[in-house]
Image (tube, rainbow, N blue to C red):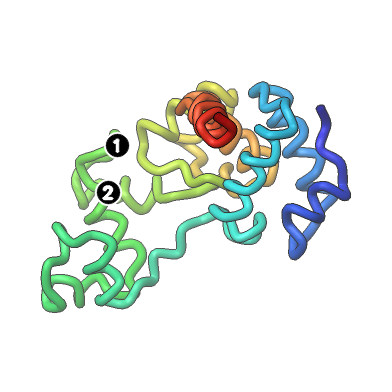
Amino acid sequence: MELLAKQLATAMPTLRAPRVWLSVLNEAMERFEIASSAHIAAFLVQVARDSKECRYLEDDLRYPAEALMRMWPNQFPTLATARPYERNPEKLANFVYSDRLGNGPPESCDGYRYRGRGLSRIIGRANYASAGAALEVDLERQPESLLEPRNAAMSAAWIWRTRGLLERRKACALRLIA
């Protein structure tokens, strides 16, 4: 089933460049077998929420200290620990994403280099490498490639396929109608 322009406009009424997104979303859904109307609808809702209707393809990370404490309470238990990272995306990403998701220590700058990008936010060097291999794009060397509409859409569909989101949606739908 192919997504139609009217359906995309209904799902994302404030979408900019709808022709571009319609094309790449259809290509991504076909490649990663997001085919039923229910799956397409669920995928679009998720993508629209994650990217604010395809407007934001990269995590900003310019948070006030209070937000840092809510989002990462273990790393920022007090205002004093959060203040040095407040509204400092590079320092924040290098700290909170260090030594995990395939990233090195803070001084490697991997946290910022491999921060959340794409429609559904790929985060971490290991995830960039996995997604890149699947998409046949060298995301480790060119992480900013996830800001291109085709790669952003493909990576979101890849996440859906590899993280079992289609199956979870099926199970949820079956529980709702049972």
Does 94 sit above or below residue 82? Answer: above
Quarter of the image for residue 95 reads bottom left
- Image spot of residue 98 (x, y percent): 23, 47
Side (left or right) of 126 relative to 136: left
Three-letter amino acid code at the position of disc 1: Leu
Give coordinates of residue 155: x percent, y percent.
57, 35
Q: Which mark is residue 101?
A: 1
Q: Residue at x 66, y 32 (%)?
A: 39
Q: Mark 1 near mark 2, Cβ–Cβ under 8 Å?
A: yes
Indicate whether 73 appears above or below 105: below
**In the image, 155: left or right of 60?**
right
Q: Quadrant of the C terminus?
A: top right
Three-letter code for the amino acid on which mark 2 is drawn: Tyr
Element class at badge 2: loop
Judging by the rendered image, the residue that carries numbered circle 2 is 97
In the displayed structure, would residue 15 be above or below residue 169? below
Q: Residue at x 12, y 73 (%)?
A: 78
